[in-house]
Image (cartoon, helix red, strand yellow):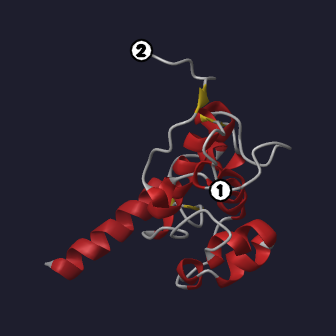
């Protein structure tokens, strides 16, 4: 049986690291919506793509990083170990997008309500030719080619 995209879900499913807080905190008879939970999981995946590690181990108040993100996002972005390892500042639009996608709050325009609203975010509306997806530093093709040639010369 195929369920509607707007159906109320009851089954606790998914990989814990990617689970939205409304699934983790769900009581026996409570329901949740699949799309907002999927947006949260996509936020975890986008974080992993950007930083090569998960943002937290679980979306609960027991997890220090998740709790800090919910209470003080600016402190989270300043103190998170993955962010501190980055050699350059993180793009502000990426921070805003990830903060919203990983929000505990589904309502009040905190977490995006659809994939379309994620893709309409300023972070994805920028030009696509980037040197570094984390910092969104722009470069032209000639510059990319020159850097590529330099690396090839070092290898040979």
* Residue 8: quadrant of the picture: top right
- Looking at the rendered image, the disc whose residue lies closer to the viewer, 1 or 2, is 2
Locate residue 22 relative to residue 108 in the image: left or right: left
**Which of 37 and 122 lies nearest the eye of the viewer?**
37
Mark 1 touches mark 2? (CB < 8 Å):
no
Q: Residue at x 70, y 76 (%)?
A: 76
- Image-quadrant location for residue 30: top right
Up the image or down, 147 lies above or below 14; here it is below
Residue closest to the far top = 1
Of callouts 1 and 2, the N-terminal one: 2
Q: Which structural element holds mark 1? A: loop
Q: Is residue 75 visible?
A: yes
Q: Residue 15 appears at what percent x and percent y?
A: 42, 53
Q: Closest to the observer: 29 or 150?
A: 29
Identify the residue under disc 1.
102
Helix, strand or loop at label 2? It is loop
Residue density around tag 2, few if under 14, some if 14–19, many if 20 or more, within 10 Å: few
Name the residue nearer the viewer: 104 or 46: 104
Residue pictured at 46% horizontal, 62% vertical: 48
Q: Residue at x 86, y 44 (%)?
A: 108
Q: Is residue 140 visible to the viewer in this orientation of the structure?
A: no
Residue 152, given in percent of the width and then of the height, sits at 22, 72
Residue at the right extreme, as displayed: 108
Q: Residue at x 41, y 62 (%)?
A: 144
- In terms of depth relative to the viewer, which is nearer, 23 or 108? 23
Q: Position of residue 95 (x, y in %)?
A: 68, 63
The quadrant of the rendering that contains the C terminus is bottom left
Q: Is residue 82 above or below residue 138?
A: below
Residue 133 versus residue 77 in the image, above or below: above
Instruction: Give the tally of numbered discs.
Output: 2
User: Which residue position is annotated with label 2?
Assistant: 1
């Amino acid at each position: 049986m195929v369920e509607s995209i707007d159906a109320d879900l009851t089954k606790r499913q998914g990989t814990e690291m990617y689970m939205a807080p409304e699934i983790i905190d769900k009581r026996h008879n409570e329901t949740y919506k699949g799309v907002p939970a999927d947006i949260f999981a996509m936020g975890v995946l986008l974080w992993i793509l950007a930083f090569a590690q998960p943002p937290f181990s679980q979306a609960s108040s027991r997890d220090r990083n998740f709790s800090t993100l919910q209470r003080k996002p600016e402190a989270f972005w300043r103190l998170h170990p993955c962010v501190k390892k980055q050699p350059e500042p993180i793009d502000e639009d990426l921070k805003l997008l990830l903060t919203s996608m990983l929000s505990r709050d589904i309502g009040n325009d905190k977490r995006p309500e659809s994939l379309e609203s994620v893709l309409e975010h300023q972070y994805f509306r920028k030009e696509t030719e980037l040197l570094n997806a984390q910092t969104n530093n722009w470069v032209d093709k000639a510059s990319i080619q020159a850097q590529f040639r330099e690396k090839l010369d070092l290898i040979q």
